[in-house]
Image (tube, rainbow, N blue to C red):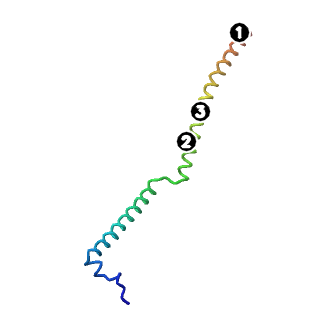
């Protein structure tokens, strides 16, 4: 059975065939380029679980730093009070 659109000489020796082959080649090139970019993006990005764990660790570290600053202030305040109480008790005794 003869199919006029699938005749090979039309694609290779006629200007319309050259345009068809050029467009097909360009579309193949663009598809390969997009696939390559997606692969590169996948390699560069961290896994979702890794990012979640990393963000949780950052949050815990920030909270610990704030607590340490708060406790340092309280420690200074109460150590001064403790020292005053000890010195007053020593003076009365």
Question: What residue do we see at 28% from left, 81% from top?
Answer: 9
Kindly report which numbered mark, 2 or 1, lies closer to the viewer in this rendering: 2
The residue beneath circle 1 is 91
Question: What residue do we see at 29% from left, 80% from top?
Answer: 10
- Closer to the N terminus: mark 1 or mark 3? 3
In the rendered view of the protein, which quadrant contains the N terminus? bottom left
Residue 46, relative to residue 71: is it above or below? Answer: below
Residue 71, relative to residue 62: is it above or below? Answer: above
Q: Residue furthest right?
A: 93
Question: What residue do we see at 55% from left, 45% from top?
Answer: 55
- Indicate the position of residue 4 as horizontal and vertical percent values: 34, 84
The image quadrant of residue 13 is bottom left
Asked which secondary structure carries label 2, the reply is helix
Left or right of residue 41, residue 87 in this image:
right
- Indicate the position of residue 77 as horizontal and vertical percent values: 64, 21
The residue beneath circle 2 is 58
- Indicate the position of residue 38 as horizontal and vertical percent values: 43, 59
Question: What residue do we see at 29% from left, 74% from top?
Answer: 16
């Amino acid at each position: 059975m003869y199919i006029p659109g699938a005749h090979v000489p039309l694609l290779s020796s006629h200007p319309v065939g050259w345009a068809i082959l050029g467009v097909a080649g360009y579309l193949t090139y663009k598809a390969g380029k997009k696939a390559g970019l997606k692969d590169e993006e996948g390699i560069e990005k961290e896994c979702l679980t890794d990012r979640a764990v990393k963000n949780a660790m950052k949050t815990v570290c920030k909270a610990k730093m704030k607590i340490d600053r708060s406790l340092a202030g309280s420690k200074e305040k109460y150590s001064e009070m403790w020292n005053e109480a000890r010195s007053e008790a020593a003076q009365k005794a």
